[in-house]
Image (cartoon, rainbow, N blue to C red):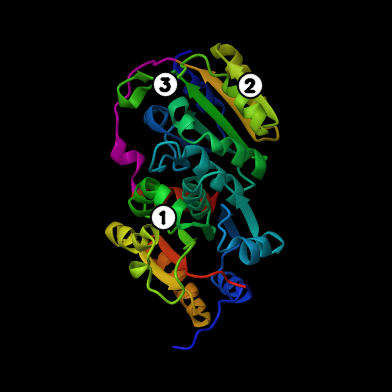
Amino acid sequence: MADSPLKAADIIREIKLAGIRFVVALPDRVTSHYLLKGMMNDSDFRVVQVCKEDEGISICSGLYAAGHRALLMMQYTGLLDSVNALRGVAVEGRNPVCMLVGLLGKEPGVLPIRDKRYGIRIVEPVLDAMGIAHHLIEQATDVEKIVPAVEQAYAASLPVAMLVGREPR
Amino acid sequence: MKRDECLKALARRRKDEIIVAVYTAAQEWIHIAPSDLNYTFTGAMGQGSSHALGLALGRPDKRVVVLDGDGSLLMNLGSLVTIAHAAPKNLVHCLCENGTYETNGAVPIPRAGEIKFTELAKAAGYPKTYEFSELQEWEQALAIILSEDGPVFVDLKVEPGEAYPEDFRRLYSIEYRDRFREALRKS
């Protein structure tokens, strides 16, 4: 398959199409420069910065209870650090927490489960064990997964993780 | 102050505020002030203040009061900075400081009685902080606290009062969460 770089503008467009206006974030090197900073300067978004990723799971859940869609942006390390909040707040609490998760250091073109880094390799198995849907966003056409993933999360009232495999430009 | 007496004082002053409550305060609150605008579905320890922030940002027209615990807040201290930075004017962050992990065997929290939670909140950037150890003072201040611009932080020095039946299934019920969503939508 031909390599086609991710574009930050395409991701932002799809996030807006998904009806998301609240972005809850802790900076992640994969997504900070072109995505998060772009969103912070985009008046269509209200960006809420958090000190720790599990806060974001609960903030998104509070926003859901108030009738809003939200996106939680973080690095995969933050996702792993938030397993208990994901368990109790998102899965058992049936909250559609939509996560955009940067896979920092992922080898280009290699499936996450085959990556040389232990931390990258375990992300999908951990999500599978928790019953959390996930999608790899690495090629330009992968952005088409975003709207259906968000819609499905809200339809099922369950979380979803969109794993960003390379830096969008 | 007896915690349930503090909660009863809040219940007497409540109009249509959203009340987010955790652990023992939640167990007591659902008996003292039943309402579909009670939010107890916090799911994991320490997360009450973060749920409250989401609600406050999502419904700036509604006052949101969170009844946090000291053990819970210690588990999510960064939320003080997050809340101060987001600066929701409609959020009142009440801390039921009893010095113990009451739900988990009443083991003391680290530095029980020595932590100045109001100073932590001030340093984080909360513009208004209060500390109460007298029930009458708390009750008298409630009218102002429930109407002034926040985020407001209130440290309530409490001890257990009357015993109320525990009902964890009710606290984390999806059915009640959906009732909350519907009640808030109509409110």
Label 2 CA crowd tier, 10 Å (few <14, some 14–19, many 20+) = some
* Up/down of A1 relative to B5, above or below: below
- Is disc 2 on the same chain as disc 1? no
Q: What is the chain letter for disc 2?
A: B
Taking the view exactly as shown, the residue that stands out farthest to the front is: A116
- Residue A123 visible? The answer is yes
Q: Nearer the viewer, residue A14 or A112?
A: A112
Residue B21 painted magenta = no
The three-letter code of the residue at mark 1 reads Asn
Quarter of the image for residue B160 reads top left
Q: Main SS type for the magenta part?
A: loop
Residue B171 painted magenta = yes
The residue indicated by pointer 1 is A95
Question: Residue B130: which numbered mark, if any?
Answer: 2
Q: How many marks?
A: 3
Find residue A48 and report its horizontal and vertical position in percent: 61, 51
Alpha carbon distance from label 1 to label 2: 33 Å
Label 1 CA crowd tier, 10 Å (few <14, some 14–19, many 20+) = many
Find residue B77 and report its horizontal and vertical position in percent: 53, 34
The three-letter code of the residue at mark 2 reads Tyr
The residue indicated by pointer 3 is B109
Q: Quadrant of the C terminus of chain A?
A: bottom right
Mark 2 against mark 3, which lies toward the viewer? 3
Q: Which residues are magenta?
A: B159-173
Q: Find out whether the residues at labels 2 and 3 contact each other: C-beta distance under 8 Å.
A: no
State which tag comes first along the sequence, 2 or 3. Answer: 3
Where disc 3 sits, the SS reads: loop
Alpha carbon distance from label 1 to label 3: 30 Å
